[in-house]
Amino acid sequence: MKFAAIDIGSNAIRLLIEEVHVDDGQFHIEKVSLTRVPVRLGEDVFTNGKISKNKIQQLIKTMKAFWYLMEVHDIQIVRACATSAMREAKNRRAVIKKVEEESKIQIELLSGDEEANLIFSNYFAQNLSAKGNYLYIDVGGGSTEITLIKNNKRIKGQSFELGTVRMLSNATDPKMWEKARRWIQSSLGANESITAIGTGGNINTIFKIAGKKPSQNITATEIKEQYDSLSKYTIEQRITKLKMKPDRADVIIPACEIYLRLMGYAKIQQMIVPKIGLADGIILDLFSKWQMTKKTSK
């Protein structure tokens, strides 16, 4: 059975299609396709407080294209979720209504807590040590979701208005850094051993250009090395010489800063980098609810 998740973020909009195979109580999830469009809604919202007419049209065209892609793939179940930029847009209700009228896709506005919970649901798919302590950090364009996991249990989670596009727009409240620091340090015991789990397109890119293998972790020192190296290039040089996508070449620097500062607050040296994100969490949640429906209908 195929499921689709649409993640309407502050930097890009993603359509993830995955097929779930179930046999004798066991299931396997296989990625079918991932389509990413760099609409960057946060560019408007974090500067002017609302989504411009031009961005609304880009959003509508993207969602129409996604609708046709889902028809081709014969998608049975879909969920479209919007995060930080849409949450803060003053004209969000009008935008959501117009998108639904023109593309047939209904957008669900996620709270910061709901976003953090969906991202966290990916944790159990990683087969990590049940006795380990982890700080799950997902950096997006408008916000960063942090979840503390101890002994295979979610202890607490919080969404902070710290994001890459927000930083590029000079719209970050300095007090938010202090809020994140206090939250992290008050959540951890003295001399407590903890590992970070980093998700998001930027950390995947940093991981790749650092030459890391899937079975390896990346250290805070290695992230800092990449930050120092990338900072020597202009945005255009990152595109032409390092072959980065234009909408990745500018946000990767603030992304490094966010990961490094948060890891520093927690005194974390090691980070696990699985290739997952909000869209994966949405599909896991859809599959879980579909399973429950099947069980109750028997």
Image (cartoon, rainbow, N blue to C red):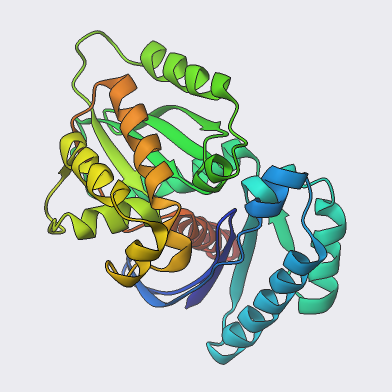
Q: Residue at x 82, y 60 (%)?
A: 95
Looking at the picture, how far across and down is residue 128, in whole percent?
Answer: 21, 43
Residue 194 in which image quadrant: top left
Q: Residue at x 51, y 41 (%)?
A: 117
**In the rendered image, the vertical position of residue 33 relative to residue 8, given as above or below:** below
Closer to the camera in the image, 174 or 14: 174
Closer to the camera in the image, 137 or 254: 254
> Is residue 258 toward the left or the right of residue 233 in the image?
right
Residue at the bottom extreme of this rendering: 72
Q: Residue at x 13, y 58 (%)?
A: 211
Q: Residue at x 15, y 45 (%)?
A: 217
Looking at the picture, how far across and down is residue 2, in whole percent?
Answer: 49, 77
**In the rendered image, the vertical position of residue 13 relative to residue 135, given as above or below:** below
Residue 93 shows in this picture: yes
Closer to the camera in the image, 10 or 234: 234
Looking at the picture, how far across and down is residue 145, in whole percent?
Answer: 48, 37
The quadrant of the rendering that contains the C terminus is bottom right
Looking at the picture, how far across and down is residue 104, in whole percent?
Answer: 77, 76
Residue 87 shows in this picture: no
**In the rendered image, the vertical position of residue 262 relative to residue 43, given as above or below:** above
Residue 237 in which image quadrant: bottom left
**In the rendered image, the vertical position of residue 172 relative to residue 36, given as above or below:** above
